[in-house]
Image (tube, helix red, strand yellow):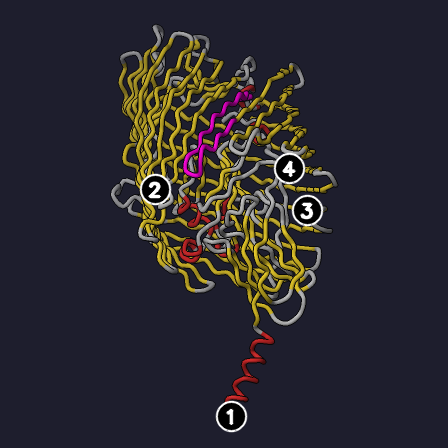
């Protein structure tokens, strides 16, 4: 018996020698526990393991014999590094960063001066599997995620997507594994830097620290009943200071049921035309994007990224229908056929460099070059005649940006300069006309952000926009201001109030300024407007956020927006051509008063999220010879259920959104989707059901209020009705995990200037 006990004691001593623990407790400067902080254990510079703190700030991490570096970190606090061995380290204090003076609470969502920081719950990560599903579960203000269509918007506008502050396409973010995420940084007020791009928000996914090794990701989606295919491949490998990545994206659609119903009138004293048209407009398209990227991370302060990309796009449309037309009292019944073909090729290179310097300084530089080759053909045939367009185009764009930032105690200053030179030449072969236009676009800005107190923070910025367009004969030059301001009051851990304002111009495109005229059919033509002026938008919003410790929340806002000289589509009769001409003109104003709220609960019974969103808008549009007013109430419902490796979600439009702009009143799609996803280790399967209660598919309506061209158009993407899509995602990691690079700039944006 003694021999047995002695043997067991030796075994336990051996186990203890190789499986010991380091314990401790993390608190802030006020002695409050820091929840879900990251704790990592290093042997020299090699990561051994990691964990997060619990509800009381405590942690326990396994180790062997020897001395380690324990690194504790949490957003808004200084990193803490402790040289230690196995044992209890007692209470460790993390000091708050001076810039934002973030108040840490037990909530997984922390509000900083310019963003929300979210620490996903372990059960959410386990169930979500992929990042896109996880984002859908977070319930952040203004964020809308359509898992079925792989789309992300913020307050209905453009969302800039980043991984470790490096901008990425939605496909890469969508297929990122959720368990690789350290935190999510989200902003629905992106500031002056991104204001020129028209961005409404930024989503930045910060990954856990990784080391050498590689990863392969393959994802595919296909509808069971129609031509709907998405594909994605990513291979990446990190070794030492270098990282290599190769990415391919495929998109394919082949829809044979796209019905259109058109009721049009063209009214002038000299000519009156009414049309009633019923058409099916089947189409197919295919996109290929191939990207190769190399990253060199010299150290934590210096990085260089080079990438090359080539994108191919082809689309064909073949329409058939019938039309009843009455032209000055003469009625005819006609058949209609339309064939159009579009082909684009856009190669691109991207060079990026960043360097952090002492005293809180940082510089970022980015250069992007793009070349484009475009082809567009369109033939419209009625019984009474044929109307054709054929355009060959090519051009290039060269863009650059430089950003410098520095911290001064509680304040951070950021300044930057963006510049783009764009050239486009288009040959309208059937008209014997060739146009060439050059655009120079410069944007100089500065931002200042910081904290007035522990509860009040601010962000202000302003910029100057210089825009010059020339066609070789005449030129247009514009100088405009862009400005933003934000004031945030964190009343207490449950309540916060944000007031924001922004002023930004919208500049006309090359095609909008082109003087080229093209006849569309026997009634209508289109032409650019060289005299078009930029419009300017002033937006003001007051947001209120309330979060209950048990998961109940309200995100509400009221606001006012106004366009000065909005660019709106107009129609006028040209007696010399005996046609109604469509182009853009500057109206007097467009304004909107709105109020909205998203209410719901997160983590009900630890597995259910439910939210309802409603929005009321009062719109006024005014220009020469017209004034229109419309009111609209929109409502949607969103829900997710998650348990272990399973997640199910649903999104329904209860009341569609109708919006007035210019003399057009448009209805957004009646979106409906249900999905179920299950994950087996490296394989994730998802089943999606589009429009389960709308067999006609996505429905769009547009009503024209013009006295010259009143109309009503209704169309359906009928192939999406009752469409079931199966998606599979597989990821294999090999070697030790690689560490992602950090690239924050993304420039470019070629403008082909075609009038179609």
Q: Which mark is residue 188?
A: none
Residue 395 in view in this figure: no
Residue tagged by mark 3? 305
Residue tagged by mark 1? 2
**From the viewer's perspective, is 598 left or right of 175?**
left
Q: Position of residue 602 (x, y in %)?
A: 36, 46
* Mark 2 or mark 4, whichever is nearer to me: 2
**From the viewer's perspective, is 341 left or right of 736?**
left
Residue tagged by mark 4? 370
Magenta-highlighted residues: 487-507
- As measured in the structure, the alpha-carbon distance from the residue carrying label 2 to the one carrying label 4 is 48 Å
Label 2: few (<14), some (14–19) or many (≥20) C-alpha neighbours in 10 Å: some
Q: Quadrant of residue 167?
A: top right
* Mark 4 or mark 3, whichever is nearer to me: 3
Q: Earlier in the sequence, mark 4 or mark 3?
A: 3
Q: Earlier in the sequence, mark 2 or mark 3?
A: 3
SS assignment for the magenta stretch, majority: strand
Q: Position of residue 290 (x, y in %)?
A: 58, 49
Q: Secondary structure at mark 4?
A: strand
Cβ–Cβ under 8 Å for marks 1 and 3 = no
């Amino acid at each position: 018996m003694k021999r047995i006990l002695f043997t067991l004691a030796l075994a336990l001593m051996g186990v203890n020698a190789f499986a010991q623990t380091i314990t401790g407790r993390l608190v802030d400067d006020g002695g409050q526990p820091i929840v879900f902080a990251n704790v990592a254990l290093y042997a020299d510079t090699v990561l051994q393991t990691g964990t997060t703190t619990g509800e009381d700030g405590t942690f326990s991490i396994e180790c062997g014999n020897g001395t380690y570096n324990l690194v504790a970190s949490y957003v808004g606090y200084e990193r803490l590094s402790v040289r230690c061995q196995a044992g209890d380290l007692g209470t460790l204090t993390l000091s708050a960063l001076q810039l934002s003076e973030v108040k840490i609470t037990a909530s997984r969502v922390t509000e900083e001066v310019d963003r929300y920081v979210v620490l996903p719950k372990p059960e959410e990560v386990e169930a979500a599997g992929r990042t896109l599903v996880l984002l859908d579960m977070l319930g952040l203000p203004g964020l809308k995620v359509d898992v079925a269509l792989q789309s992300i918007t913020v307050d209905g506008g453009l969302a800039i997507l980043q991984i470790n502050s490096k901008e990425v396409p939605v496909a890469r973010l969508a297929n990122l594994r959720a368990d690789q995420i350290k935190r999510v940084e989200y902003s629905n007020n992106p500031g002056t830097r991104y204001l020129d791009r028209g961005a409404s928000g930024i989503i930045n996914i910060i990954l856990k620290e990784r080391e050498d090794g590689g990863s392969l990701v393959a994802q595919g989606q296909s509808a069971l009943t129609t031509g709907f295919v998405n594909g994605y491949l990513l291979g990446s490998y990190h070794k030492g200071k270098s990282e290599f990545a190769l990415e391919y994206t495929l998109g394919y659609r082949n829809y044979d049921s796209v019905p259109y119903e058109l009721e049009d009138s063209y009214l002038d004293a000299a000519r009156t035309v009414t049309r009633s048209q019923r058409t099916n407009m089947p189409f197919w398209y295919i996109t290929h994007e191939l990207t190769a990227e190399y990253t060199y991370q010299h150290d934590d302060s210096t990085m260089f990224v080079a990438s090359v990309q080539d994108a191919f796009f082809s689309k064909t449309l073949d329409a058939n229908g019938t039309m009843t037309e009455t032209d000055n009292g003469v009625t005819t019944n006609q058949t209609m056929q339309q064939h159009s073909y579009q082909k684009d090729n856009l190669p691109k290179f991207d060079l990026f460099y960043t360097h952090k310097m002492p005293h809180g300084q940082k510089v970022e530089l980015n250069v992007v070059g793009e070349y484009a080759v475009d082809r567009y053909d369109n033939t419209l045939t009625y019984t009474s005649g044929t109307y054709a367009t054929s355009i060959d185009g090519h051009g290039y764009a060269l863009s650059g940006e430089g950003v410098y930032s520095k911290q001064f105690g509680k304040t951070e200053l950021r300044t930057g300069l963006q510049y783009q030179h764009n050239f486009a030449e288009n040959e309208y072969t059937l008209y014997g006309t060739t146009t060439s236009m050059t655009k120079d676009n410069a944007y100089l800005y500065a931002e200042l952000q910081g904290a007035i107190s522990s509860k009040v923070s601010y962000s202000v910025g302003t910029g100057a926009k210089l825009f010059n367009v020339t066609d070789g004969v005449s030129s247009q030059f514009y100088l405009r201001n862009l400005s933003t301001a934000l004031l945030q009051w964190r009343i207490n851990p449950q309540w916060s109030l944000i007031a924001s304002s922004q002023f930004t111009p919208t500049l006309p495109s090359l095609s909008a300024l082109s003087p080229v005229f093209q006849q569309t059919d026997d009634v209508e033509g289109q032409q650019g407007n060289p005299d078009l002026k930029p419009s300017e938008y002033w937006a003001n919003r007051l947001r209120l956020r309330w979060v209950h410790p048990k998961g109940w929340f309200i995100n509400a806002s009221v606001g006012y927006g106004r366009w000065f000289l909005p660019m709106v589509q107009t129609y006028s009769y040209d007696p010399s051509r005996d046609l109604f001409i469509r182009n853009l003109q500057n109206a007097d104003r467009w304004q909107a008063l709105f109020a909205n709220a998203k209410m719901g609960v997160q983590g009900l019974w630890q597995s259910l999220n439910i939210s309802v969103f409603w929005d009321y808008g009062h719109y006024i549009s005014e220009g020469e010879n017209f004034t229109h007013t419309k009111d609209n109430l929109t409502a949607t419902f969103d829900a997710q259920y998650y348990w272990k490796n399973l997640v199910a979600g649903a999104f329904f439009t209860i009341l569609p959104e109708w919006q007035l702009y210019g003399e057009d009143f448009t209805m957004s799609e009646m979106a409906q989707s249900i999905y179920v996803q299950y994950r087996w280790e490296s394989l994730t399967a998802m089943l999606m059901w589009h429009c389960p209660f709308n067999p006609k598919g996505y429905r769009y309506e547009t009503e024209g209020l013009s006295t010259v061209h009143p109309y009503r158009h209704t169309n359906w993407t009928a192939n999406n009705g009752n469409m079931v899509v199966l998606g599979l995602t597989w990821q294999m990691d090999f070697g030790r995990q690689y560490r992602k690079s950090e690239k924050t700039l993304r420039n470019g944006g070629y403008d082909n200037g075609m009038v179609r």
